[in-house]
Image: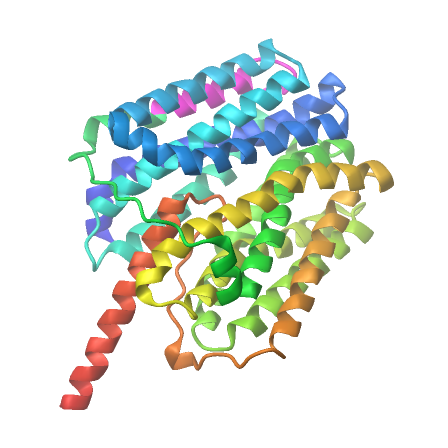
Amino acid sequence: MIKVLSNSWALLLGMMMLQLGNGIQGTLLGVRGEIEGFSTFSMSLVMSGYFVGFLFGSKMAPELIHRVGHVRVFAALGSLISAVLILYPALTDPYAWALGRILIGFCFSGVYVTAESWLNNSSSNETRGQALSLYMIMQMVGIVSAQGVMVMADASGYVLFVIASVCVSVAFAPILLSVSPTPAYDTTKPMSLREILRISPLGCVGMLLLGGAFSAQFGMAAVYGAEAGLSIGQLSTFVATFYIGALIVQYPLGYLSDRMDRRVLIMGAALTAGAGALLAMIFGDNFTMLLIGAFLIGGTTNPLYSLLIAYTNDFLEADDMAAAAGGMVFINGLGAVAGPVVTAWVMGAIGASGFFLFIAVLMFVMAAYAAYRMTQRAAPSVEETDSFTWVVPSASPMAVAFAQEYDIETAEAEAEADADDQEA
C-alpha cells in the first residue's frame, strides 16, 4: 500500500479533487435548478446530458489520445471542464446547462481514460489490485466530501460554482507536474453486443437496468431532494449517504462474491436495493428512514456493477475479457442516458417519490430476471469463477479493462500456485 501511494499519490490526489468538483456540480445543479424554476423534465435533460457525453467520450477519447497524446488531452479536457463550471450561473437556461453537461461528461470520460492509463502504467502485477482499490476509494471520498462543501455558501450565488471550477483546475497541477513517463495506450477490438448477450444474458440485462438506476441516483437525487423540500444540509447528507453505503458494503459483497453463486448474490443485492427504495418512498417524510433507504440503495447498486462484470467474466476466456469490457460499459451507458428522463416522467406523474419508485422497479426486475436465469443453466463452481474487483459504475472502459487485467493476472497466479502444490 505504501508503495502504491508513493508511486501514485499525485494522481490519486488529483482524482479526488476532480471528483470533489464533479460532486459539487451534480448536487448544485439540482438545487439551483429548483431555485431557477426549471421543470423536473428540464432538469432530467440536464442530468442525462452528462451520460450522453460520457458515452460518446468513451468511444472518442482513445482516438484523441492516439492523435495528440495523453498530456495534451488531459490538459485540454480539464480546461474545458473548469470553463463550463464557471459558465453555469451565467447561462441559467436548461438547454444551455444540458449542452454544458454533455461537454463535461465527454471531458470527464477522456480524463478518466487518461488517468487510468497512467495508473495502470505505474502499477506492477503485485500492486495493481491495491492501486485500483485506492483509485476507486479516492473517487468516492471526493464525491462524499463535495456534499460537505455544499453548506459553505448560498446555492443561489456564484461561489459554489467557482469552488467547483477551482477544485478541477487545481486537480490537474499535481498530476501534470509529477506523472511520467507517458503511458502506452492500446485499444482492443470490442466484442459485439450480440455476442456478449449470448454469453451472459444476465450480465447484459443487469447492466442496462443498473445504468438506469445509477444515473437516477447520481443525476436525480439532488433534484428529488430539492422537490421534497430538504434543506441544503439534509440534501447534502442524503446524497452523501448513497456513496458512504457504497464504500462500506462493497467489501463484504466482494467477499461473498468469490464464495457463492453470483446470481444469488445479484438477486439478493437487487432485492435489497428495491426494498430500500420502497422504504424511502413510503417513509420519506422521516429523514432517518430516508437515509436508511439511500444507504441500502447506494450500498447495493454500486457493488452490483462489479458483480455483473465478474459474473460475465465467469463465462469468458481470459483473452476475451478486455474485448467484452467496452461492450458492458456501453450497455450500462445506454441505460444511464435514459435513467434521468424516465425518472422525471415518473416524478411528474406521482410526485417526488417517483424517484424511488423508478429505482425500485428496475431493481425488482433485475432480481426477477436473475431468479429466472438460475433456472436456465447451472452456475460455474466457485473454484472456476474469476475474482471480484471493485469498479464503480461511473468508471471508463479503461478502468474496467484495468480490472479485467488484474483478474486475469490473479487467476493465472492462482493456477500456477495450484500446479506447484500438486507437483509438490
Q: Residue at x 54, y 44 (%)?
A: 333
Q: Is residue 32 above or below residue 294?
A: above
Q: Is residue 36 above or below residue 418?
A: above
Quarter that holds the N terminus? bottom left
All told, the count of numbered labels is 0
- Where in the figure is residue 214, as x and y percent of width and height? 59, 47
For the question of whether residue 298 can be seen, the reply is no
What residue appears at the point 29 percent right and 37 percent down from the top-left corner? 11
Q: With 10 as the anchor, is 77 left or right in this view?
A: right
Magenta residues (range): 153-170
The residue most toward the left is 424
- The question of residue 64 being in magenta is answered with no
Q: Residue at x 57, y 31 (%)?
A: 26
Residue 104 x %, y %: 49, 26
Closer to the camera in the image, 164 or 181:
181
| Residue 181, x across and y down, in percent | 15, 35
Q: Nearer the viewer, residue 327 or 374?
A: 327
Residue 400 visible in the snapshot: yes
In the rendered view, does 34 fall on the left or right side of 109?
Answer: right
Q: Residue at x 42, y 43 (%)?
A: 396
Q: State the predominant SS element of the stretch in magenta.
A: helix
Magenta segment: does it hold 156? yes
Query: Based on the displayed image, in which of its 4 quarters is residue 185 positioned?
Result: top left
